[in-house]
Image (cartoon, helix red, strand yellow):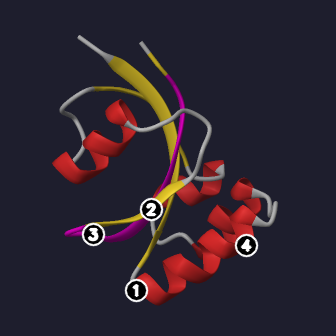
Amino acid sequence: MPRACARHILVKTKEEADKLKQLLDKGADFSKLAKQHSQCPSKKNGGSLGEFNKGEMVKAFDDVVFKGPLLKVQGPVKTRFGYHLIETIYRN
């Protein structure tokens, strides 16, 4: 079963996600932004979701984590929870 480790920032609007993405693209600290802006309880860990199996997350999120580039912030990705900025740390 493929596994991955990722972190994310979850916000309510695409506009907010776009603004945060611009800051990240300019070198802002992912953990800091997650702690300040994310709506997910993972924000207390800098957005880290730890390690999880393929299929444990909603499909759009899973697709980015298991198919996208490593260590590059992807998004905004829309799910029923809101808009995510996702960084895949590793996968196997």
Work out whether mark 4 precedes mark 1 in sequence or the reverse, and give the earlier one. 1
**Is residue 19 at all visible to an observer of this figure?**
yes
Examine the structure image and report whether residue 83 is included in the region drawn in magenta: yes
Q: Secondary structure at mark 2?
A: strand
Amino acid of disc 1: Thr
Magenta span: chief secondary structure:
strand
Q: Is residue 61 left or right of residue 5?
A: left
Q: In the image, what residue occupies the spot 67% across and 74% down? A: 22
Which residue is denoted by mark 4 in the rendering? 23
**Is residue 50 at all visible to an observer of this figure?**
no
CA–CA distance in space, label 1 to label 2: 12 Å
Work out whether mark 1 precedes mark 3 in sequence or the reverse, and give the earlier one. 1
Work out whether mark 4 precedes mark 3 in sequence or the reverse, and give the earlier one. 4
Q: x%, y% of residue 18?
A: 53, 79
- Residue 75: mark in rendering: 2
Q: x%, y% of residue 9?
A: 52, 62
Amino acid of disc 3: Phe
